[in-house]
Image (cartoon, rainbow, N blue to C red):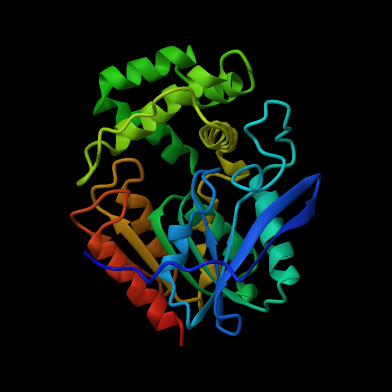
Amino acid sequence: MIELHPPIEPYDRGLLDVGDGHHVYWETCGNPDGKPAVVLHGGPGQGCTPGMRRAFDPARYRVVLLDQRGCGRSRPHAAGPATSLRHNTTDHLVADLERLREHLGIERWLVRGGSWGATLALVYAERFPHRVTEIVVSAISTTRRSEIDWLYRGVGRFFPEAWQRFRDVAGDDDVVPAYARLMADPGRRERAALAWDAWERTVLSLEPGATADVHSGPPDDALLAFVRLTTHYYAHAGWLEEGAVIRDAGRLAGIPGVLIHGRLDLGCPVTTAWELAEAWPGAELLVDDRSGHGASDVKRAWLLAALAKFAG
């Protein structure tokens, strides 16, 4: 079992007013004089967790974590049906990162993200390459419509019974926008959130070490926000041109990058990571043949090694 760094607590934290009525939660951990790094959580809408701090050597890194708009400790929370998502888009999240960087007085930082966080990391770096020292991404997604269609329709060929249940709650073959509409309906959003969560767990169920856990009881605010934000973002394909992240990867030339992926990742097939590595001059692609979307000892070791190397 590969051990991460010991648990640490933030030495500073706050709520940053990013405009539009939104306040984004942030925290900093480790060495205030260390190498700056920012961690971007997945989802969209999952929020950051204490475990994310532990990939970084606290003696060498100044680690910044944040809850993206609408989730975690940021306010207003997307679990509230009255909370508008009008000002919650990829462009807004990228702008929030720049505001936070400036607020913390950081000139340049390493950007780390996984799954949706990988998309956000790449979009941010392509727009602000002069603010990024290195990039470390895992469970790589670029939020193309083709990737979303695979995750919420195509992969159903492996789980036809579960996909039919997922589709029946949607009431429409175009399930992602259908679920986005359901999540806006106070009378139907709880059932929709549980069905969405059940589908996501089904897709992960064939991975090594997967558990059969299901959400028991009514959905909590964290799950409601996660499903509401995920369906909101994916119904719009992240407001990104199809293929734009890979198309624009040339802008990352000169930024060292490590791409970590599991070959058995059924939700985010490895072809996306491979296409990105082909388009990004100098990027290093590491593929663990024995893991999927979740963590593994091999991928933990690669992550720790990459961050140790980039610490300088």
* Residue with the most extreme bottom position: 312
- Is 208 or 262 nearer to us in this picture? 208
User: Residue at horizontal 62%, vertical 63%?
Assistant: 27
Locate residue 160 relative to residue 249 in the image: left or right: left
Q: Quadrant of residue 131?
A: bottom right
The reply to whether residue 172 is in sight is no
Residue at image point 33% right, 21% down: 163
Whole-percent x, y for residue 36 in the image? 57, 76
Name the residue rendered at 46%, 88% in the picture.
Answer: 312
- Image height of 284 relative to 42, above or below: below
Find residue 228 and report its image quarter.
top right
User: Where is residue 214 shown, x and y percent of the image?
Assistant: 34, 29
- Describe residue 273's horizontal placement relative to residue 70 as left or right: left
* Position above or below: 84 against 6: above
Quadrant into which the N terminus falls: bottom left
User: Residue 214 versus residue 199: which sits nearer the camera?
Assistant: 214
